[in-house]
Image (cartoon, rainbow, N blue to C red):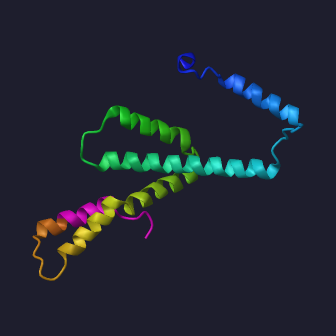
């Protein structure tokens, strides 16, 4: 396919030309320093933690959403969580807490809290059922994991 577009350069030939050019200029590739390896590992860990938390948040949102869940999407999210979340129970508890915190600070919960505040404004006359329903939603979906 690449040949038909005129871009017949393959990845291996680009690498070869790069290494030839660097050899011609005398540039040497050195091993990464301990500091570089440490920074890279910290970054990878941070990204894996983020992926874990986002997957857990999405799983929680799907589970509590009250709508039909696409099994393929749920499976994908579960697989992402399994690959990126820790198997250490203490760390996993922290990851779960971070996911719940993201949910509690997310747009849905901010909107729900604002709606409840609007309902409680002077002059408004919501029914007890409306207040109860809104409050229950907030308590079940939007409560921060640590108070």
- In the image, taking residue 72 as reference, residue 130 lies left or right, namely left
- In the image, taking residue 48 as reference, residue 143 lies left or right, namely left
Pick whichever, 102 or 14, lies toward us. 14
Residue at image point 89% right, 37% down: 26
Residue 12 placed where, x, y %? 70, 23
Residue 8 placed where, x, y %? 62, 20
> Among all residues in the image, which is located at the extreme front?
6
Work out whether residue 89 can be spotted. Answer: no
Residue 136 lies within the magenta run: yes
Residue at image point 32% right, 46% down: 63
Q: Classify the position of the C terminus by image quarter.
A: bottom left
- What's the magenta bit mostly, secondary-structure-wise? helix
Pick whichever, 21 or 45, lies toward us. 21
> Among all residues in the image, which is located at the extreme bottom?
122
Pick whichever, 100 or 9, lies toward us. 9
Q: Look at the picture and state if 66 lies above or below 124.
A: above
Work out whether residue 32 can be spotted. Answer: yes
Residue 131 lies within the magenta run: no
Residue 92 placed where, x, y %? 53, 50
Quarter of image, res 7: top right
User: Magenta span covers which residues?
Assistant: 133-147
Q: Look at the picture and state if 105 lies above or below 15.
A: below
Residue 44 placed where, x, y %? 63, 47
Residue at image point 27% right, 70% down: 114
């Amino acid at each position: 396919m690449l040949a038909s577009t005129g871009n017949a350069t393959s990845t291996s030939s680009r690498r070869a030309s790069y290494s030839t050019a660097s050899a011609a200029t005398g540039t040497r590739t050195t091993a990464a320093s301990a500091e570089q390896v440490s920074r890279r590992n910290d970054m990878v860990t941070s990204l894996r933690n983020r992926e874990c938390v986002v997957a857990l948040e999405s799983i929680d949102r799907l589970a509590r959403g009250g709508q039909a869940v696409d099994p393929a999407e749920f499976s994908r999210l579960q697989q992402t969580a399994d690959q990126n979340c820790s198997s250490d129970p203490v760390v996993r508890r922290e990851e779960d807490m971070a996911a719940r915190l993201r949910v509690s600070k997310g747009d849905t919960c901010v909107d729900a809290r604002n709606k409840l505040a609007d309902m409680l404004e002077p002059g408004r006359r919501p029914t007890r059922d409306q207040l109860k329903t809104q409050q229950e939603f907030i308590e079940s979906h939007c409560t921060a994991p640590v108070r």
